[in-house]
Image: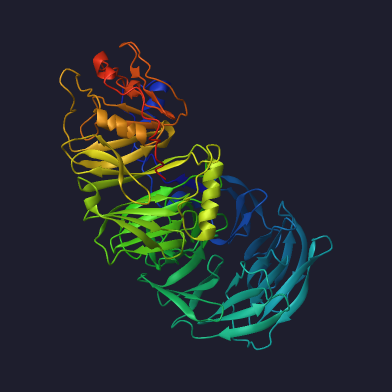
Amino acid sequence: MVESSGSSSSRVGQRKRPYQQSLPAGEKMKSEEMKTLHLSHGLQHQCRIVLASPVCHVTYDLQRRAFVVLDEANTLHLLTEDGCCQGRVKGQAPMTGILYASHVNQFVAWDTGGLQVLDSHFQLLSQMPSALPIHCGIYSKRLNRIVTAGDGNLTLWSFRYGSRSLQCRASVSTGLGPTDLFAHLALDTGSTSEPHCCFASCATGVATFDISRGNLLAFRTKLHSREITDLAYCEATGCVITASRDTTIKVWNKEWDIQIVFVGHTAPVMAVTIYPHRPLIFSASQDGTIRTWNLNTVDQVDQVHVSEPVESLDTHTNSHVFSVSGCTLNLWKISQLYSLYKVLGSPARRLSCIDLGLLGNFPARILCLCQDSTVQLLEAQSGAPISVLSLDQYSPAREVAYCLPRETLFVLLEQGHVLRVNAAPSSMTVKRCFSSSLWESKPCSLLLYSHVVEPDKAYATWLDVTQNQGYRRKWQKSTINMQDRNRFLPILGHKDGSLSVIDWFLGRVQYTVEAHNPERVTALAEYPTQICVLSAGESQRPRGRKGCQGVPGLPRNDLERLGSASLGRLEGSITQLPPKLSRLWRFRESSQEGQLVSRSASNPTEVVRCQHQELPLLTGCPQFGASLPTAPEEAVGRIPTKFPAEAPPPALC
């Protein structure tokens, strides 16, 4: 008899109300979709399966992707990963344990008197007696051998006759006594070099065997104060984990030096297993809990309560754990919503990810600004540290911006100074400190705008910078075809509400735009796909010239600065946005030349062409679904039609 029930499918106590009309199928679907979905981390109970007899052993069939459960009535139950019973078979010979040999697609069962080989349909193929009692067994995929252990021995078995039978290859008893009763086995699954180790627990100690050559390597005793109840091997860390009746879980290296002791259970720990390919341990105790421990953070990360004491615990897949309690088998699903990424050593104030994978073979980076006045640059995939900057001699940092192609970091300090830092070496170095006196108003926000139109040149620049351990200014003039058209612009937001682009090497203002005057700029962000910059300020209402209904024009000197900055095309739109967000600026590139082009007032774009660029002023904002009145025709007439040829646009980078 098998009773299966899900954790959320119980209908006990539910009664259908009279005259209750059922909802249409469409309404039911809509109602289900609108329900709040609660995501949780750790072990999630999937189903509970009750057998007629107590469970003896559980293994996993890789071909069927199903669990095979052996009970004390000598019956084999085949269960799917969601707990459904696919069938049961009565054993033809007594069995106390069973395992699956994946290389030959056969099952091997045992009792105290010997072994038996079963085919994939659980039909008996052969029986092999054992001279010594067998208490536990395990399968080595690497050697395609069966390892059994019992009273003072460990025996190795090999398949023969087309994998229909087993033959004893070696029996290890040297250095062991008849009182050494081995109860649990674990294999070193991580190492591919010799020796291939097998660990067997006995009372308070563990013996280490070389099953490649068939000899005893070490036998450590008194590892715990009470009997060891289970052990496992963690491939991710290369350590052996032991659980004991003394309520502790200990982690050992291969030289049996203790690494970690986990304390938290209030009763004997009866079972322990590992999460495959992850540094996580699951343990079950008689205190009614299953706990999850992280080997990296060395602490408990999850805990679930069970109604029955757990006798055994194991993982056979990457997403399932099963626990056995008498006649009950519980299946748990591993839900990993988060995992440890990197221990910073100090709380992080700012965190950003720089990923230029769409532009080339750039590595992804994580930038962290910590409270201990350090800036850490991490490798995004693994969290490994790349370079660190210490700001102990400076005031606390307010914001940081990172340019990956040039391996340069800009740091805005609380005092208003800006640091330009070389991030190429493992220990970052400050190349220049720009004093706040360089600007009319103190900066309070920072953005590094990247406009990459030639990804190959940007990647070549990054390779050159990493090789030379820093970005250097090129003093030789290049031809127009050889010039780098990529732009990386440090942009500051000031307390007076203005935005300014500063020179990369000298920090001087290239041009300034009134954005939130006179209120300060609170935040800056770039929108790369739309080639625009977003700014937020403390202004609670849009500001503009009288009669323009919130659409101010730009002063003449601002347009001249924009024209001489060689930024390419600038589209500025000022619209009725929510509070704290009232300006939107766009940067685009063009290489056309020409004179002023006059357009009708119905066209929302007025275009000014100058040397090597065009500067349209957008007075409508179709992106936000609103078209505002255009600026007066006479306002456009004040825009200079052409800049002097003897004053070419200076390069910003």
**x, y percentage for residue 336?**
45, 52
Relative depth, front residue between 262 and 98: 262
Figure disc tally? 0
Instruction: Answer whether residue 370 is visible to the viewer in this image.
Output: yes
**Image quarter (top left, top right, bottom left or bottom right) of the C terminus:** top left
**x, y percentage for residue 497?**
20, 39
Residue 109 location, quadrant: bottom right
Instruction: Answer whether residue 83 is visible to the viewer in this image.
Output: no
Residue at (40% x, 74% y) in the render: 247
In the picture provided, is 86 more to the left or to the right than 643? right
Coloration mode = rainbow
**x, y percentage for residue 252?**
50, 77
Residue at (46% x, 77% y) in the render: 259
In the picture provided, is 20 more to the left or to the right than 203? left
In the picture provided, is 458 more to the left or to the right than 163? left
Relative depth, front residue between 182 and 265: 265
**x, y percentage for residue 57?**
58, 62
Which residue in the rendered view is the most extreme toward the front?
A: 646
Above or below 172: residue 358: above
Above or below 318: residue 583: above
Residue at (48% x, 65% y) in the render: 311
Above or below 252: residue 336: above
